[in-house]
Image (cartoon, helix red, strand yellow):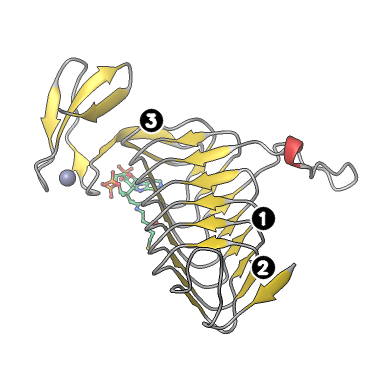
Amino acid sequence: MSTHNGNTQTTEKSTDYFVHESAYVDLPCKIGAGTQIWHFSHIMQNVEIGEKCKIAQNVFVAAGVKIGSNVKIQNNVSVYAGVTLEDNVFCGPSCVFTNINTPRSAFPRNTIDDYLVTLVKQGATIGANATIVCGHTIGRYAFIGAGSTVTKNVSDYALVYGNPAKQVGWMCECGAKLDDFEVDTATTCKACGREYEYCAENQIKRKE
Ligand SMILES: CC(C)(COP(=O)(O)OP(=O)(O)OC[C@H]1O[C@@H](n2cnc3c(N)ncnc32)[C@H](O)[C@@H]1OP(=O)(O)O)[C@@H](O)C(=O)NCCC(=O)NCCS
Ligand SMILES: [Zn+2]
């Protein structure tokens, strides 16, 4: 395995991404054009990162993790094995992922089979200092408030916060809160005009 830092690196796919001289990228990795990796961050081998991502300061990405395009990872976030971030995900500063549900120092559980999967779907936001207990899926465009502890799956477009995180409403793709609405009804975002309708119990979708 080789490691590079600085901004002169090459990979299989592209050479036009940026790695600050204080950051480490363990090769091989696939990193898309326009992605920036800032101070003191460490990307392990076999990671795949899409285009135009911003990986801020002191971020760790474990071997084999897949990250989509236009993902923003703020300072002090570790993306452990078992975590996948789809396109346009926002990870607020110091948010915490986990990958082992019942860790014990004297009984190591650190093979890939021990890890519980966390999937953060397209467009979701994780607020600052939130903790995601492993084994859960955060739906498309879901919004996790700052400091929350997520212990269950989160529906697409759901706004959740608190410890344990509870759903308190719905959030538009644009990041504005949607007015409360009921089963079999629809609502329009006051900020951007996108329309949503209920499609199943506690599930909404963009209106066609
Ligand atoms: C969740 C959020 C979007 C606001 O949602 P909101 O429903 O509009 O919240 P409001 O400010 O109207 O507050 C409503 C209630 O929820 C509480 N609340 C708001 N955010 C909360 C949070 N993250 N955790 C717990 N409670 C929260 C408020 O204290 C208030 O409680 P009250 O009714 O008892 O007074 C915002 O608080 C938040 O957490 N944003 C994330 C910020 C962040 O992490 N950014 C990262 C990049 S810098
Ligand atoms: Zn909107």
Q: Is residue 127 left or right of residue 95?
A: left
Describe the element under mark 3 as helix, strand or loop. loop
Location of mark 1 (residue): 63
| In this view, 185 is above or below 145 | above
Q: Quadrant of the C terminus?
A: top left
Q: Report which quarter residue 104 is drawn in.
A: top right
Q: Residue at x 16, y 34 (%)?
A: 179
Q: Is mark 2 within 8 Å of ligand 1?
A: no
Image marks 2 and 3: residues in contact by CB distance under 8 Å: no
| In this view, 27 is above or below 155 | below
Describe the element under mark 1 as helix, strand or loop. loop
User: Dot 2 surroundings within 10 Å: few (below 14), some, or many (20 or more)?
Assistant: some
Which numbered disc, 2 or 3, marks the residue that appears first in the sequence? 2
The one of 19 and 14 positioned closer to us in this rendering: 14
Which numbered disc, 2 or 1, marks the residue that appears first in the sequence? 2
Q: Is residue 121 left or right of residue 48?
A: left
Residue 134 screen position, x and y as percent: 61, 39
Tell me how far mark 2 sits from mark 3, CA to CA.
35 Å
Q: Residue at x 9, y 42 (%)?
A: 193
Residue 194 screen position, x and y as percent: 13, 39
Tell me how far mark 3 sits from mark 1, CA to CA.
28 Å
Q: Residue at x 50, y 63 (%)?
A: 13
Image marks 2 and 1: residues in contact by CB distance under 8 Å: yes
Tell me how far mark 2 sits from mark 1, CA to CA.
9 Å
Location of mark 2 (residue): 26
Describe the element under mark 2 as helix, strand or loop. strand
Residue 161 screen position, x and y as percent: 41, 41
Amino acid type for the residue under numbered disc 3: Ser
| In this view, 12 is above or below 23 | above
